[in-house]
Amino acid sequence: MHYGHALTFGTFLTPSARDPGQVVSLATRAEELGFDLVTIQDHPYQPAHLDAWTLLTWLAGRTRRVTLAPGVLNLPLRAPAVLAGAAASLDRLSGGRLALALGAGAFWKAIGAMGGRTLSPGESVAALSEAIDLIRARWDVTGEGPVRLHGEHYHVDGAARGPAPAHDVPLWLGAAKPRMLRLLGEKADGWVVTHQLLRPGQLAQGNRRIDEAAVAAGRDPREIRRLLNVSGDFLGGPGEKWVEELLPLVVDDGVGTFILMTDDAETLERFAGEVAPALREAVERELPGAFPRPLRRAAVRARRREGIAYDDLPETLAETAIEPGDVGYAEVRSTYLRGGAPGLVLRPGTEEEVAEALAFARAHPHLPLSLRSGGHGISGRSTNDGGIVLDVSRLDSIDVVDPARRRVHIGPGARWMDVAAALAPHGLALTSGDYGGVGVGGLATAGGLGFLAREHGLTIDHLRAVRMVLADGSVVRASDHENPDLFWAVRGAGANFGIVTSFEFEADEVGDVGWAQLVFDASDTAGLLHRWGAAQEAAPRDVTSFLLVSPPRRGRPPMAHLMAMVDTADPETILDRLRPLAEIGPLYDQSVVLTSYASVMANASPDAHDGRGEPVTRSAFAEHITPEFAADAERLIRGGAVYFFQIRSVGGAVADVPPDATAYAHRSANFSVTTFGVDRRRVDAAWDRLAEHVDGLYLSFETDTRPERLADAFPPATLRRLRELKAAYDPDNVFRDNFNITPSTTKEPTHA
């Protein structure tokens, strides 16, 4: 019986307290020799032993690749609820390299919740079963509410869920007795047993018990890895003899992992050099093609969504894909502001894998397809319910290929704070919104209204070429000279035309900048808005400011927060530029510093996105902040329908680009206006009263998905050209999730 597990090798080390450096040296040497696993005995009643968990933590910091596991952990001495948090923490710290092997503690009296007495075999099984449930419940951060368990041996009432491990930590059991083997088949991921302690035929008998219990529990026996501890005494003799002895254990008894029990470096080296490679070759000869991708646990498969052919995923995508039952799902299901429950998140790491992921998505035309780079986008969906998310966050390279020509290649999954940090040593920068956590892919295909916009233009104005995967899976390069129509469309409407896998930018020379944050009393909201608009329009191009006005709350007046960047390192010039802005209203607080652009953009949280619900926003452009606009904006802010109102200054260098040069056509506007609320109907009704003062909209800030918003986003000639190009590049409308431009039915130009 073979279970389809690729053959791996580990070592079983004694945690000797007499020479701690020796066990650490053996573990690191095992990694160097190519071993896959290092296990540590957990016998705390041995006075000459180091604590296994402490040692594993130390080894996690001294190794980089090898999986670490206790062999096995004495569960009665480890409170499961606490152990779950410790294991998840170590797994995250080690980069997903922990396996948790548990045992009933045969040589130790049960203590704590177990009443300080030795448990019967049946009680030990029940206690271990409860512990497994408790550990997995704490790891399941997608579960509702706190963890509660009222068992015979463990009582937990309201334990917090999390932290989640970095990967689906396998739970192995050290077991030999029938009841323990049945529990293993029902709930565990691996069987750890020592060959010397087995009677002839006991391995096959144990497999049968495990398999029967697994099937009865609705599981596939192939979910359970079989790990066998072997010692030098058992092996003995030349390497060929070892292979001859071990091969039947793989072929006939399904062993997937051999763990060498030794504290001798020479034995480790001999096993790694003579036995492991020869045994792998022998197994491949005996069982050619018998190692399919690892099988996800039944509990994970049970959470799969209907209509997705999960088992058809290409091998290159399966390892990094995340399903609803996976431990990493909570970190990828939602975006910065929007909650979601996708059926599958694909995370390609290469351009070829992007094409494979897209092909898989195209085989599911009935499902939503969402594209994600940083997952911050307000308008960009980036998630869905039951569909596929194609997440390019792993394509996050940042390469300054030619500092003299200021040429930079950036992957779509890079975040702008990391881009700014990478460019800063070269004296370069790219304007890029106001939040460093935004992904490059979404912003650099929509526009890019940042703190350097008036001086240096939009982000897309610095784009010189892209590589992208089109709807049919082909890969093209687009620039002013290659596929120029596509390059035109990508700059302002890129989400409709393909998946950009690499951006080539020409960065700007930017040194230190002036950075100001001013807080105003906005009781005279209309007056403050009008005065700020006038001061900003009159300011030189090296000044770009954003104004955020919050409504009155709990008896406090409206507040205005102004953020301004002055693109110069001269303190006197900075203060001179800021003075008119500081005089627009009564100041509550002020901060002005000379700093780097990178430090301003280093403002993002490292936490995973955990958005809830649906953001409700409206967006538009304004030529000027007139008194009439300011008065209606004050009524909007004070009316209770919105909680966030921001105006960003544009104009300047943005307006130097002809409106038909890119799909972003609103070049003459001096201001971009955005508001947030919680009720779509109320927000729309309040926003409509501003309609006579504004025009157009910025795709990245608009969540109203009604078709007429396309006419706001793109002037008639621009939209007509986009529809014609859509018919050429995406006639089946594969990319339809974000401000969908439907293909034209009247003209289909030749594919450039």
Image: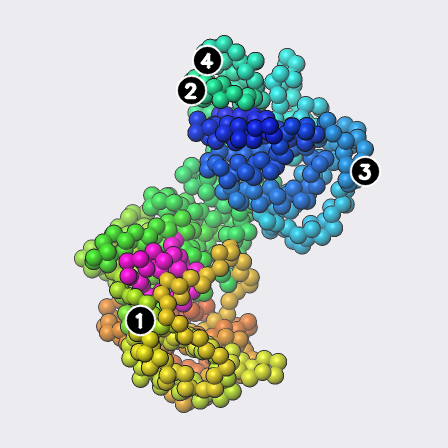
Distance Cα–Cα, label 1 vs label 2: 61 Å
Task: Say whether marks 1 and 2 touch (CB < 8 Å).
Answer: no
Label 1 sits on residue: 569
Which is more N-terminal, label 4 or label 3?
A: 3
Which is more N-terminal, label 2 or label 1?
A: 2
Label 2 sits on residue: 273
Mark 1, mark 3: which one is toward the viewer?
A: 1
Closer to the camera, 737 or 336? 336
Amino acid residing under circle 1 = Ala
Label 4 sits on residue: 239
Percent x, y of residue 556: 58, 83
Which is more N-terminal, label 3 or label 1?
A: 3
Whether residue 264 sits left or right of residue 153 in the image: it is left
Magenta residues (range)? 413-440
The quadrant of the picture occupied by the N terminus is top right
Q: Is residue 381 above or below residue 109?
A: below
Residue at 52% in and 11% down = 236
Closer to the camera, 60 or 1? 60
Label 3 sits on residue: 115
Task: Say whether marks 3 and 2 touch (CB < 8 Å).
Answer: no
